Image: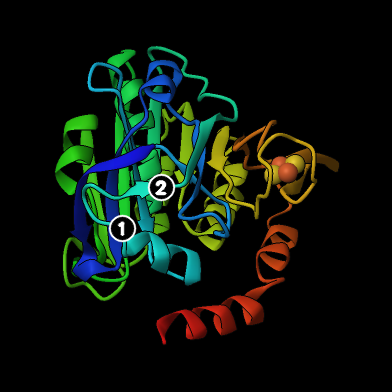
């Protein structure tokens, strides 16, 4: 059983951290890999990238935003409750090149995915400038952890309630203008990753993004997670989740992510009753 041993609420209860007992996964997992979780027998399979792993304790940590029926069911699980299924580690781990000047850009709950990557890069001797953002101060997560994982941290909020008022791309543009950036890592809402990638392409700076397509089996069998990268079909679950941001067809990804919006809204409404 995949028992929850620690649970925290962030961003006013809309973002939840679960530390889950999963010793065999914790022993094998590497930064950038993900899990597929199911709350109960009939539950939907939800992919979440690991925010933390602790091989000694035998636990893995995920952080998710409550956005629909399945994450609403996840939210109702407390310490001592268990997920029906946790499958992983899945996907390719992050490729880290030591000694690079890296800018890590994170938005919303993407910061939870970005954190282990930024930390891994800093541990590998990279100079890590991080830029994290959210709509407002209450929705900003993991500021302290990102500060430790970075050489330099910038914070942006859309409404100016904390840090600099504006988008993460504004700070990124200043860094790119200053020069010396070897690589950008962008993880967050798809439009944010799209605009970061468009900007870095102008400056010729390689950019890695972590994609979150709809997934079912997580093993490359169903094709549900297909994305177009460099004109070729790739599977997010086995080829990703990380891809070259300059090659990703973000508009297609946005359309595919919206395919079941109406059914998801209806299902979420029924679940609240
Ligand atoms: Fe089925 Fe990737 S989730 S092929």
As drawn, 101 above or below 87: above
- Tell me whether circle 1 and circle 2 mark residues in contact (CB < 8 Å): yes
Q: Earlier in the sequence, mark 1 or mark 2?
A: 1
Question: How is this picture coloured?
Answer: rainbow
- Residue 125 position, x and y percent, is 31, 13
Residue 45 horizontal side relative to residue 18, left or right: right
Front residue (pair 42, 170)? 42
As drawn, 205 above or below 167: above
Q: Secondary structure at mark 1?
A: loop
Quadrant where ligand 1 appears: top right
**Residue at (78%, 38%) from the top-left corner?**
234
- Residue 205 position, x and y percent, is 55, 34
Please tell me the numbered disc located at residue 83.
Answer: 2
As drawn, 220 above or below 250: above
- Residue 99 position, x and y percent, is 37, 13
In the rendered image, is residue 210 in sight? yes
């Amino acid at each position: 059983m995949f028992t929850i041993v620690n649970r925290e609420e962030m961003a006013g209860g809309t973002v939840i951290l679960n530390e889950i007992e999963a010793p065999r996964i914790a022993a094998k997992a590497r930064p950038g890999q993900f899990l597929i979780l199911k709350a109960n027998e009939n539950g939907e399979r939800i992919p979440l990238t690991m925010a933390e792993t602790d091989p000694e304790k035998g636990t893995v940590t995920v952080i998710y935003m409550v956005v629909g029926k399945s994450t609403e069911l996840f939210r109702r699980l407390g310490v001592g409750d268990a997920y029906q299924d946790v499958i992983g580690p899945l996907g390719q781990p992050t490729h880290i090149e030591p000694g690079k000047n890296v800018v890590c850009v994170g938005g919303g709950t993407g910061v939870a995915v970005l954190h282990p990557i930024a930390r891994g890069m800093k541990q590998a001797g990279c100079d890590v400038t991080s830029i994290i953002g959210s709509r407002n101060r209450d929705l900003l997560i993991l500021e302290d952890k990102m500060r430790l994982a970075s050489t330099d941290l910038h914070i942006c909020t859309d409404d100016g309630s904390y840090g600099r008022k504006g988008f993460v791309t504004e700070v990124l543009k200043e860094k790119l203008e200053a020069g010396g950036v070897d690589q950008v890592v962008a993880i967050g809402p798809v439009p944010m990753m799209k605009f970061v990638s468009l900007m870095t392409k102008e400056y010729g700076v390689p950019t890695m993004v972590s994609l979150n397509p709809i997934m079912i089996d997580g093993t490359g069998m169903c094709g549900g997670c297909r994305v177009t990268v460099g004109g070729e079909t790739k599977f997010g679950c086995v080829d990703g989740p990380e891809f070259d941001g300059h090659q990703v067809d973000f508009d297609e990804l946005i359309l595919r992510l919206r395919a079941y919006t109406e059914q998801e809204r209806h299902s979420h409404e029924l679940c609240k009753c």
